[in-house]
Structure formats: C-alpha cells, structure tokens
Image (tube, rainbow, N blue to C red):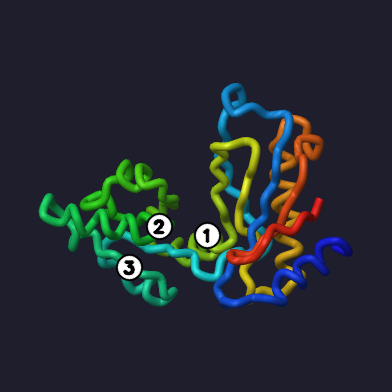
Amino acid sequence: DERLTPIVKEILSSVQENNETVQLQLNIKGYENRKDPKMTKDIVFPYVMRRDPSCAVIGNETIRPIAESLSIPFILSSDYEGKAKEAEREKIITKYKYFILCADYQKSFNLREILKKKRTHFMCPVAEKLPELYESLLNTYRLKVKDWFALSFPVGHCQMPVEHIVANIKYGVQFVADNLKKGPQNIKNCFLKRTTGPNIQVY
C-alpha cells in the first residue's frame, strides 16, 4: 500500500477525462507463446473496475423491465430476426463489448457471431438473476491470454477512491501470480497507466 497509494494518487492527479480507466500491465518471464497453453480466466475484483462497461442485454419482452430498471441497454431479440436484419445485428455486436444473453436471445443472435467479434458474453437463463449478474459483471474482467509476455487489464476508473483502486491492483497481481507456473517468480515487472497517461513502473 505504501508503494501503490502515492503512484495511484499521481496517476489520478492529472486526469483529463472522467471516464478514463487505470490499467495494470504485467510483463511475464518463463513462458513461451508457442509452448505454453493460452489461458482464459475470470478475475472477480473486490471493487468495480469499469465506469462504463459497454454492455447490452439481449432477450425477450420479460427481460425488458429488469434491464431498464438497471439502466442497461436492452435489445429485444424478436426485433432482429431473419436475414433482412443481418446488418443491424452486426452493428449491435460491434457496438458493445459485453453481452448478457437471456431467454430467446438465440432467436436472432448467434453466439458464434458474438465470439467471432471477440466480444465477452455472460449467460442469464433466469430473468430474476439479471441484477445479481450485472453487479458481478461490473467487477469481472475476463482475462484472455494470447501473448504471455505482457498481460494487461483494467483495475479501476478515475472516479474511484484511491484505496479501491489499490485493492483491485493487489488482487489482480495476486490472481495472476496464483495462476502462473512459478507464481510471483514469473512476473518480470509491473506497470500502471491511465487511458491517456504514461506507463509508471510499480515493480
């Protein structure tokens, strides 16, 4: 905390935009992209790490009031059925980064298309579970390791209390270390940066 707190304060002191994200980058050693299998893991942080998660809900009419009460953009699947709506479906998939897929989403949207566009999805078969799922989504980052040499993910946004960002950083580093072959020994160094700021070395 003694090391991280002043660095986070420094990063936040020159914020230009309210929605800027704080990113953590870990450079890894002892791994080879060709030899070591890729990894996909959900990191569930102790605090929210995104101000605007760029998320939409797709489902049937029963989902609409719940999505609207949470102020999440809602897409009625029956509005996008058929070949004629293909371009509109594509536009929606391109627009958002995260999708919560509820009952009847598959009537118009194909999961394969969502995955092809490298979008992250969360399944929500029970409408009543949507608030709980959305709450956890705000704290969740799906880490998909393609390049072992540098792992990067958000740990907070610039409107958060410093101590919440610090807690997320510590949790993120520990989570990655726990999933590496030799734990912390595989972490070469660690940087923090704001969306528009320079890299600051932490470790």
Nearer-N-terminus badge (2/1): 2
Q: Position of residue 131 (x, y in %)?
A: 47, 67
Q: Which residue is mark 3?
A: 74
Q: What is the distance, in whole Å, between disc 3 and disc 2 at their CAs? A: 10 Å
Disc marking residue 93: none
Q: Which residue is mark 2?
A: 100
Looking at the image, which residue sits at the far left? 84
Q: Are marks 3 and 2 in contact (CB under 8 Å)?
A: no
Q: Which residue is mark 1?
A: 137
Seen from the viewer's position, the closer of residues 183 and 105 is 183
Instruction: State the quadrant of the N terminus.
Output: bottom right
**Number of other residues with Cα within 10 Å of mark 3, as a class: few under 14, some 14 to 19, many 20 or more:** many
149 displayed left or right of 94: right
Seen in the picture, residue 148 relative to 138 is either above or below; the reply is above
Which element is circle 1 on?
Answer: helix
Seen from the viewer's position, the closer of residues 41 and 129 is 41
